[in-house]
Image (tube, rainbow, N blue to C red):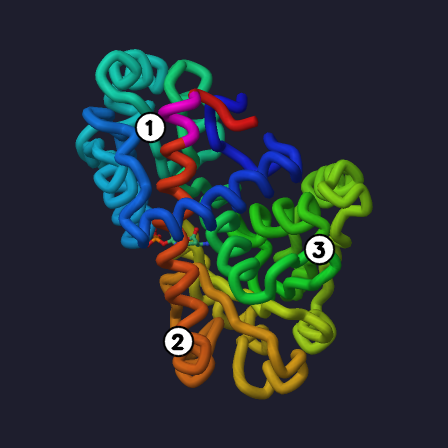
Amino acid sequence: MKKDFIDISDFTGEELKKLLDRAIAEKKLFREGKLPASCPRKVLALIFEKPSLRTRVSFATAIAQLGGSDIYLTNADIGLGKREPINDVARVLRRMCDAVAARTFSHQAICDLARFCPKPVINALTDYSHPCQAMADVMTAMEIFGDLAGRKIAFVGDGNNVARSLAMLCVKLGINFTLACPKGYELEDEFVKEVSSQSQGSIDKQGGVFEQCNDPAEAVKGACVVYTDTWVSMGQEQEREKRLSEFTGFQVNEDLMKLAPKDAVVMHCLPAYRGYEITDSVMAKYADTIFAQAENRLHFQRTLLNVLITEGRID
Ligand code: CP
Ligand code: NVA
């Protein structure tokens, strides 16, 4: 549904590119003090079943900068689907709030919230996807490299929620995407089929090429961005030891970066686990880019709220 922002696959390349261009323009306006506070008295409900720094702070700050306010609800507060059915939660929030952003374990939970709530519902990360992160990441890469069509992003690490959203966004914008992960951590066949079919309807009509392999050295060749994320996502803590051992060799370190083009940058959605998926020295070298990504969560989501609350839909 275009009233929501649940998954990158729900939108065309043109719609996503328009949102990114608008976020870049509104970031500039905001910094010049010229962005109108378009959401006075509007209230954003923030539902978080998992911890968060960037996502929570960026949504709360964004709605405040637009003149509205937020209410933060943890699972201990509302027990989504446990203390009461998701439908009832949605039926209450729709009467009191103007938009909902939710971080849930199950992707189905946010789809159900969106189905039962006529107000905008935004995915603030699920086990399946993290679309706001992907948008802020590509926004950051656009600010560094300009037009990204035909370029390559290499993701070294787990075929997880962050990789899935970024891959889908890349192919829709004509950006090539390669995931390098240990055997068994690739993105699933169903997603590969979907990403390939969506690539055909991409903005440049050619589509970015999606590939996955088990060799980080191969993946970073020719990439303008080398991306990584934790090897142990929230909710996978019981697999920690197994994952740490199986991801050996998939660290973004200085040796790997020697194989990437000289002007390539490293990106990380954060939080970063130094000594595991990324070294301390690589974090330090690319800190400007990585923390610009974090800041762009705010700028992208302010635009997203502006569009969804004032216009009611994305098109
Ligand atoms: N990148 C990201 O979503 O960070 P948080 O988990 O801190 O929100
Ligand atoms: N893949 C990570 C992203 C954290 C922002 C997780 O889901 O925990």
Task: Name the residue nearer the viewer: 287 or 81.
Answer: 287
Residue 241 seen in the current view: yes
* Residue holding disc 1: 100
Instruction: Give the residues drawn in magenta, as a range.
Output: 307-311
142 drawn magenta: no
Crowding near the residue tagged with mark 1, few <14, some 14–19, many ≥20 C-alpha atoms within 10 Å: many
Q: Which quadrant, please, contains the C terminus?
A: top right
Q: Which mark is residue 203?
A: none
* Residue holding disc 2: 274
Q: CA distance from mark 2 to mark 3?
A: 31 Å
Crowding near the residue tagged with mark 2, few <14, some 14–19, many ≥20 C-alpha atoms within 10 Å: some
The amino acid at mark 2 is Arg
Horizontal side of 258 relative to 68 (left or right) equals right
Mark 1 secondary-structure assignment: strand
Q: Earlier in the sequence, mark 2 or mark 3?
A: 3
Q: Do the CB atoms of the residues marked 3 and 1 lie less than 8 Å apart?
A: no
Residue 256 seen in the current view: no
- Between marks 2 and 1 in the image, the one whose residue lies nearer the viewer: 1
User: Which residue corresponds to the image point at 67% horizontal and 47% vertical from the top-left?
Assistant: 173
Image: 250 above or below 70: below
User: Which residue corresponds to the image point at 59% horizontal and 68% vertical from the top-left?
Assistant: 225
Q: Position of residue 119 (x, y in %)?
A: 37, 19
User: Which residue corresponds to the image point at 63% horizontal and 83% vertical from the top-left?
Assistant: 262
The amino acid at mark 1 is Val
Q: CA distance from mark 2 to mark 1?
A: 33 Å
Q: CA distance from mark 3 to mark 1?
A: 32 Å
Q: Position of residue 86 (x, y in %)?
A: 35, 19
* Residue holding disc 3: 149
Horizontal side of 291 relative to 206 (left or right) equals left
Q: Position of residue 156 (x, y in %)?
A: 59, 67
Q: Earlier in the sequence, mark 3 or mark 1?
A: 1
